[in-house]
Image (cartoon, rainbow, N blue to C red):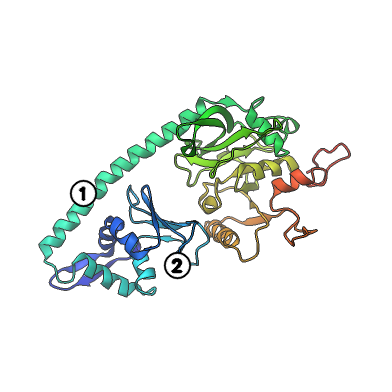
Amino acid sequence: MAGGRSSVGMAGGFGLVDIKTICRMLNERARELAPDLLPNGVRDGGHWKTSNMDDQPSGRYSLQVDLQGAHIGHWHDFGGARPGEEDGDMLDLVRIRRCGGDQKAAIEWAKRFLGIVDGDRGSFERARQEVERRASEREERFQAEIKRKRDGARGLWLHADELPGTPAEAYLRGRSIDLRQLGRAPRALRYRADVSHKELNGGKLPCMLAAIVGLDGTHMGTHRTWISRRPDGSWGKALLQEPKLTLGPSLGGFIQLWRGDGAGKLATIAEGTEIYVSEGIEDGLSVAMGMPDRRVIAAVSLSKVGSLQLPPQAGPIVIIGQNDPYGSKAVDALEREIGKLQARGFKVKIIYPPRTPEKPDGSPAYKDFNEWLCRDPRGFFGRDKNGRAVA
């Protein structure tokens, strides 16, 4: 990111000005700059959202710029961006969108925009000090808000029922995940009958809750899966545009789904223990059904796999993959996340559900492990004559 560079010379007796200062001053102007640099975007609460770095009109938005909070001016593309365009700050956005990727040109543009080149030193210093003051106040507010969200997420989970015997267990059973067969329910999963959702205009629905924790066991956030009863009496995902959402921070955290043959926290696993990592809860529990001796966690979302807090003594990190089309954004995103893990010194492997025989439309036999479990329970990972999983 641009903020990591040092300093540049200024005209008019300014001497050297740290590029971090330029970045912070640009970031403070994010509410003005983001619509100018990405004119086809839309305002969504505290974010400016657009399709991608090309800013083509679209009903789907993968790139978002923070317009407030501790990370004002910072942006991230969650949809499989081109290399070097995954995230950054406002100087990076200027470089890519206004200056053809030329960093030197972007700095010169920023100097002109901020009035540094021909302005007087006193005006610049007053502007810089005001930026620092606002940044400090915003950081205090941000930390207070993070604590409030963490407390709320933890409280929601603590005031929920344990999973056995609830509609949430029935929901999982409807996905062919039979916790009775596994012999116990993951402690991270709970159920609550009355959780509000922004699409319900104050209404509430039953919800499966999952604790998102850090490596030290700290409860960071709570993942929510809203469910509803179908006409046939079974339970499925609620008919919402976003039936799954996270409350509170989650970057670096994980949902501890299955401890396998081990015991205790993830931080204390034996040297060389493999850690199986799924994107979502259902895929991770499906693999636990097939290989109940393995340690399985969920990363909450694909874009957070590379940031997972993992113990240094871990063996290979085994990604529970999905059969996404070759060359798709999901495949590109997974490769980037794997690269992040490898850069941290972890060995990474991937497992996939069967691709063959292909479906009549040419798509893979199973998109993910849960689909494999649902459609071919006896063939899933190999089963004995009674249909029980064999590792």
**Splitting the image into 4 quarters, where does residue 358 fall?**
bottom right
Residue ID for mark 2: 54
Compared to residue 166, the image places residue 342 above or below, namely: below
Residue 139 in the image, given as x and y percentages of width and height: 30, 45
Residue 202 has which mark? none
Q: Residue at x 13, y 68 (%)?
A: 119
Nearer to us in this view, 5 or 161: 161
Q: Is residue 264 visible?
A: no
How many marks are shown on the rendered structure?
2
Q: Is residue 136 visible?
A: yes
Disc nearest the viewer among 1 and 2: 2
Q: Residue at x 39, y 69 (%)?
A: 96
Callout 2: helix, strand or loop? loop
Between disc 1 and disc 2, whose residue precedes?
2
Callout 1: helix, strand or loop? helix
Compared to residue 20, the image places residue 241 above or below, namely: above
**Splitting the image into 4 quarters, where does residue 255 fall?**
top right
Residue 257 in the image, given as x and y percentages of width and height: 62, 38
Q: Amino acid at mark 1?
A: Arg
Nearer to us in this view, 172 or 255: 172
Residue ID for mark 1: 133
Q: Amino acid at mark 2?
A: Asp
How many neighbours does mark 1 have within 10 angstroms: few (below 14), some (14-19), or many (20 or more)?
few
Residue 24 in the image, given as x and y percentages of width and height: 28, 58
How many neighbours does mark 2 have within 10 angstroms: few (below 14), some (14-19), or many (20 or more)?
few
Nearer to us in this view, 243 or 270: 243
